[in-house]
Amino acid sequence: MQSEHVASRSADQRDSSRESRNGTPQLDAVSLAIIQQLQEDGRRPYAAIGKAVGLSEAAVRQRVQKLLDQGVMQIVAVTDPLTVGFRRQAMVGIHVEGDVESIADTLTDMSEVEYVVMTAGSFDILAEIVCEDDDHLLDVINKRIRALPGVRSTESFVYMKLKKQTYMWGTR
Amino acid sequence: MQSEHVASRSADQRDSSRESRNGTPQLDAVSLAIIQQLQEDGRRPYAAIGKAVGLSEAAVRQRVQKLLDQGVMQIVAVTDPLTVGFRRQAMVGIHVEGDVESIADTLTDMSEVEYVVMTAGSFDILAEIVCEDDDHLLDVINKRIRALPGVRSTESFVYMKLKKQTYMWGTR
DNA sequence: ATGAAAGCTTGCGGATTTCGCAGAAGTGGG
DNA sequence: CCCACTTCTGCGAAATCCGCAAGCTTTCAT
């Protein structure tokens, strides 16, 4: 065998999950490296990941499981919605009066809403909508979003062409 | 490359990948079901998928490989950027004069740009930026995007809180 | 009709991976 | 020091992955 990287590994980067103040787990360098590996290929074997990050297969397995359990990451198939039958997408900018977060929560519960973010720009909320056709999209925007109490106005940006969609955070 | 291919397509049910007019492969119900399985768990074994969609393990394996090769889907780990050290994100709306698509292509080549879409709204392009800190974000927006010839003006929406991020198209 | 091309199935081994568990090692508190 | 806790490692057993081959059916073109 080889002992190429027998680190004494003192406690500076050993902590794989400490709770930070806002509840999101703090990730050490090794977990980040694992995530990076899985961002390149979500099915990469644990042994290969272990070799890349300097850990045993079992250790990688435990870390990955924990990251999944904690909700830090998820390993999923992603596609261009257009190729799977969703022909209409739009980003909707929303002006809210009153409690922004409760509106955001309501949007989150809608299955057609793929993405919700509260922003500091001229919109209070940006929400991405994925629908099957124009009627569906129109229905969601006009009947369900604009009808919410607290929604002052909306502006829609219908998608014409998706140019890029990456999941390589940390890979650069 | 192709001559006049006046096909009288009769059976479009069984065909797992025919080229449609815009080059995107056409997916049948079985491939959609496979994608759906992998959207729930990107590491689900082929045999389990086969049982769920009514195909043999080998057939699922072939289909998945083809879907990956074709770029229809990718199996990756996705995270909340905030938990992996990217503290500043923003959506940038861009007004373009001239060739919109070439601007979009340029944005696509930037590593900080996570998402690029051409829209039919008041913005010509929406681009999502992922940065490590404020300086980085400012630099990308002001020095690199607004400096592009053809970019008339931009409007930024800095993310305050990500509320939802799903990859479950077809799962509903 | 005949043949080529795709796609699926079944079956098969061997290589690889996953999985659970026991033990070792490092950490922190009392 | 000792104990509780966590993490890592090593190791068998089970499951999965992977390539391949033969046979079948459907579709499409000659």
Image: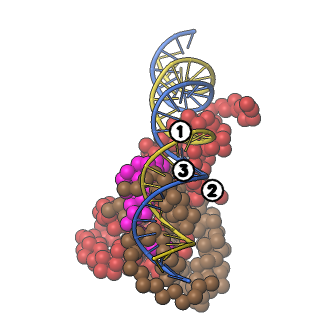
Chain colours: A red, B brown, C yellow, D blue
How packed mark 2 is, by other alpha carbons closer than 10 Å (few <14, some 14-19, many 20 or more), is few
Asked whether the beta carbons under mark 3 and mark 1 sit within 8 Å of each other, the answer is: no
Q: Is residue B51 above or below residue A85?
A: above
Does the rendering let one see residue A47? yes
The residue wearing badge 3 is A43
For the record, the magenta segment spans: B25-53
- Earlier residue among tags 3 and 1: 3
Residue B44 within the segment the image draws in magenta? yes
Residue B65 falls in image quadrant: bottom right
Image location (x, y in percent) of residue B1: 62, 84
Residue A125 shows up from this direction = no
Instruction: Compute the Cα span from label 1 to label 2.
Output: 21 Å
The chain letter for the residue carrying disc 3 is A
User: Who's the residue at 35% across and 73% down the image?
Assistant: A131
Q: Is residue B29 magenta?
A: yes
Q: Tag 3: residue type?
A: Arg
x and y percentages locating residue B64 in the rendered image: 50, 59
> Residue A171 bears which disc, if any?
2
Instruction: Locate the C terminus of chain B and report the quarter of the image it occupies.
Output: bottom left
**Which image quadrant is residue D15 in?**
top left
For the point 43% across and 43% down, the residue is A69
For the residue pair B113 and B156, the one nearer the viewer reads as B113
Amino acid type of disc 1? Answer: Arg
Q: Please give left or right for residue B162 compared with residue A59 in the image.
A: left
Q: Which residue is mark 1?
A: A61
Foreground disc of the pair 2, 3: 3
The residue that appears at 73% across and 30% down in the rendered structure is A1
Label 2, label 3: how far apart the Cα atoms are: 17 Å
